[in-house]
Image (tube, rainbow, N blue to C red):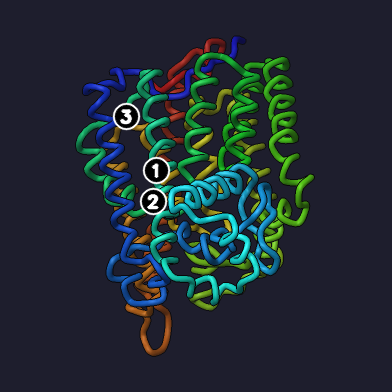
């Protein structure tokens, strides 16, 4: 059986408007997200503005907090006494590049950077003009994130993917503005889009390499490789399976090697942070703990790993037997949502992956609206909870707790919807002709 590479639903061309309209919309959303985060700069995340303006971003906290305002070396060589960056290699490199560019933009002399490397965090914060430098670092980073977002749109326009309609984007705009500049996920999203393009064009080796690049920025693109393996198994095609896996492994080694060889502790920071992390904000486990249900925190990493393995195996068996006929994008999104449901934490920017992934697999406005509303409300409720706006004097914060449950229900509903649709698709085809084609 031939391998089917179509990643999304067929239908009308993605270019329902002129390309400049999509690119301009991307610029507007990213700029709006950047401006919306400005009230929280310079440490004001510790004030009530965090809840009232919903303006949190990880980005500005790193410039001083990790010693990036001082002299530092590439590939994890931060000033002594500062914690390593807890991100995969490509994000580490991007952060370092933005900090170096900030030094150039602000014209900070090398002698001053060397002097700063001997200062503590408190002393670094007190350096005259540091607030302006921190803002510059944030804006430089956002410019890089904008370039990545524009790259994603360019890929979509080049491949004819359907990008939704005005109604869909009106519903998604709030969550996109809130999440685009919270973290560095746009870098991984660009690698994901390029991997989808490679898959659509049947470039299996390139696909595996791009998934590795995406995984070197964020773990989530790994679901693409898992989905590709299921498609290859369904088609009984050993060669694509081996090719994508070897390309993925080889690229992973090449991309991780510089950071690992330069500073093994910096390389392992990401893995140690995630392995040691307890149940935290937004997760199913914290919701259970809030209402008194026992959660074995030390076993959650194992639960996540086993849960994902079981989910992958079940999907592989169901697709190979023709019980369901999901598209490649549907498989990837289902696996990603299962990861989010089982994960130890649900960081605010994860919503970006959910809503953009949803656009690849459905045009159902009601579903997009429900998910967008659930993700947006959970984002807002998180910061209200952190600042204590909704927390009663005793008992459970029902506002925050219910926002987690609603979001989990919406994500689980998407999984059920996609599996049910793929089941209907399978029953409408001759068993001998079933392929993992794009949607109906």
Side of 365 relative to 85 (left or right):
left
Can residue 302 be seen here? The reply is no
Mark 1: give few (<14), some (14-19) or many (20+) Cα within 10 Å. some
Residue found at x 53% / y 55%: 109
Circle 1 or circle 3, nearest the eye: 1
Residue 162 image offset from top left, x and y in percent: 33, 25
Q: Quadrant location of the C terminus? A: top left
Q: Earlier in the sequence, mark 2 or mark 3?
A: 2
Which sits in the foreground, 332 or 173? 173
Residue found at x 67% / y 51%: 73
Side of 299 relative to 357 (left or right):
right
> Which mark, residue 143?
1
Residue found at x 45% / y 44%: 353
State the separation of the CA atoms marked 2 and 1.
6 Å
Can residue 292 be seen here? The reply is yes
Q: Which residue is mark 3?
A: 163
């Amino acid at each position: 059986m031939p391998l089917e590479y179509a990643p999304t639903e067929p239908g009308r061309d993605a270019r329902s408007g002129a390309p400049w309209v999509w690119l301009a919309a991307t610029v507007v959303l990213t700029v709006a997200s950047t401006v919306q985060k400005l009230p929280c700069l310079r440490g004001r995340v510790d004030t009530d503005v965090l809840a009232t303006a919903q303006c949190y971003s990880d980005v500005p906290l790193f410039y001083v907090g990790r010693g990036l305002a001082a002299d530092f070396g590439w590939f994890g060589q931060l000033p002594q006494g500062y914690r390593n960056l807890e991100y995969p290699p490509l994000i580490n490199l991007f952060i370092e590049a933005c900090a170096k560019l900030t030094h150039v933009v602000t014209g900070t002399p090398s002698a001053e950077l060397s002097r700063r490397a001997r200062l503590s965090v408190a002393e670094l914060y007190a350096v005259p003009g540091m607030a302006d430098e921190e803002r510059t670092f944030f804006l430089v980073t956002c410019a890089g994130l904008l370039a990545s977002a524009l790259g994603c749109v360019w890929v979509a326009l080049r491949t004819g993917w359907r990008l939704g309609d005005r109604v869909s984007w009106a519903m998604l705009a709030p969550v996109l503005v809130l999440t685009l500049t919270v973290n560095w996920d746009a870098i991984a999203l660009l690698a994901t889009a390029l991997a989808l393009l490679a898959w659509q064009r049947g470039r299996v080796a390139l696909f595996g390499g791009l998934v590795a690049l995406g995984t070197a920025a964020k773990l989530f693109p790994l679901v693409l490789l898992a989905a590709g393996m299921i498609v290859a198994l369904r088609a009984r095609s050993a060669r694509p399976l081996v090719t994508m896996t070897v390309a993925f492994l080889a690229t992973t080694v090449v991309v991780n090697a510089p950071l690992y060889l330069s500073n093994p502790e910096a390389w392992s920071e990401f893995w140690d942070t995630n392995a040691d992390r307890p149940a935290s904000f937004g997760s199913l486990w914290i919701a259970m703990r809030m209402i008194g249900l026992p959660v074995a925190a030390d076993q959650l990493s194992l639960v996540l790993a086993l849960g994902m393995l079981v989910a992958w195996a079940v999907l592989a068996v169901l697709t190979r037997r023709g019980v369901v006929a999901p598209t490649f994008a549907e498989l990837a999104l289902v696996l990603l949502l299962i990861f989010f449901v089982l994960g130890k934490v649900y960081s605010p920017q994860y919503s970006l992956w959910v809503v953009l992934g949803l656009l690849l697999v459905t045009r159902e406005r009601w579903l997009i609206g429900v998910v967008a509303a659930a993700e947006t409300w959970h984002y807002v409720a998180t910061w209200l909870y952190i600042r204590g706006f909704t927390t009663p004097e005793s008992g459970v914060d029902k506002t925050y707790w219910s926002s987690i449950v609603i979001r989990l229900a919406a994500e689980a509903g998407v999984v059920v919807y996609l599996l049910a649709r793929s089941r209907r698709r399978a029953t409408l085809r001759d068993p001998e002709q079933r392929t993992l084609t794009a949607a109906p």
